[in-house]
Image (cartoon, grey):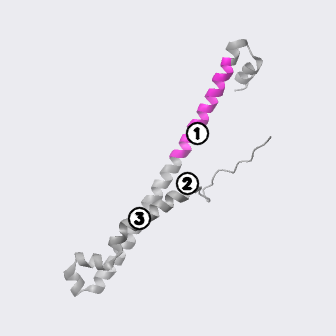
């Protein structure tokens, strides 16, 4: 009896959790920057420049928001990459532990009754 499993996500095709994490970061960023992205809110913090050089303040606001969003998005991508690398490291550790458990089970089999299967597993490992 064979069971089919889907292949693990590749670098070009993130898995469901990665997509969900990216979406959560995007929503959080949008909500956090909402007060800042509103020009009237921004201009209220700088009433004198807003009244005397509105065009320049609008350009400053636009540049500021664009750079802030870009920086936050890069940082979010760095966090996602860090989570991915930590997950890969954990998966490697688990695989190593599974190998150790098999070795211990095989050794226990040999100790319990000299089972040949246990001895063969140890010799192959």
Which badge, 2 or 3, comes first in the chain's sequence? 2
Asked which secondary structure carries label 3, the reply is: helix
What residue is disc 2 on? 17
Q: Nearer the viewer, mark 1 or mark 3?
A: 3
* Residue 88 counted in the magenta span: yes
Which badge, 2 or 1, comes first in the chain's sequence? 2
Residue at the image point whose x is 30% and y is 86% from the top: 55
Q: Main secondary structure of the magenta part?
A: helix
Which badge, 1 or 3, comes first in the chain's sequence? 3
**Residue placed farthest to the left in the image?**
48
Q: Quadrant of residue 35?
A: bottom left
Q: Are marks 2 and 1 in contact (CB under 8 Å)?
A: no
Asked which secondary structure carries label 1, the reply is: helix
* Residue 25 counted in the magenta span: no
Which mark identifies residue 92?
Answer: 1
**Residue placed farthest to the right in the image?**
1
Answer above or below: position of 106 versus 98.
Answer: above
Residue at the image point whose x is 65% and y is 24% from the top: 103
What residue is disc 3 on? 29
Answer above or below: position of 27 versus 105.
Answer: below
In the image, the segment drawn in magenta is 86-108
């Amino acid at each position: 009896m064979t069971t089919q499993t889907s292949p693990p996500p590749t670098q070009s095709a993130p898995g469901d959790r990665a997509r969900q994490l990216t979406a959560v970061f995007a929503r959080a960023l949008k909500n956090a920057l909402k007060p800042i992205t509103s020009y009237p809110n921004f201009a209220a913090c700088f009433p004198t420049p807003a009244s005397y050089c509105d065009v320049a303040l609008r350009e400053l606001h636009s540049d500021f928001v664009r750079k802030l969003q870009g920086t936050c998005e890069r940082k979010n991508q760095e966090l996602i990459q860090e989570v991915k690398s930590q997950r890969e490291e954990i998966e490697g550790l688990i695989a190593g532990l599974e190998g150790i458990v098999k070795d211990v089970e095989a050794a226990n089999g040999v100790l319990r009754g000299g089972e040949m299967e246990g001895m063969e597993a140890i010799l192959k490992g």
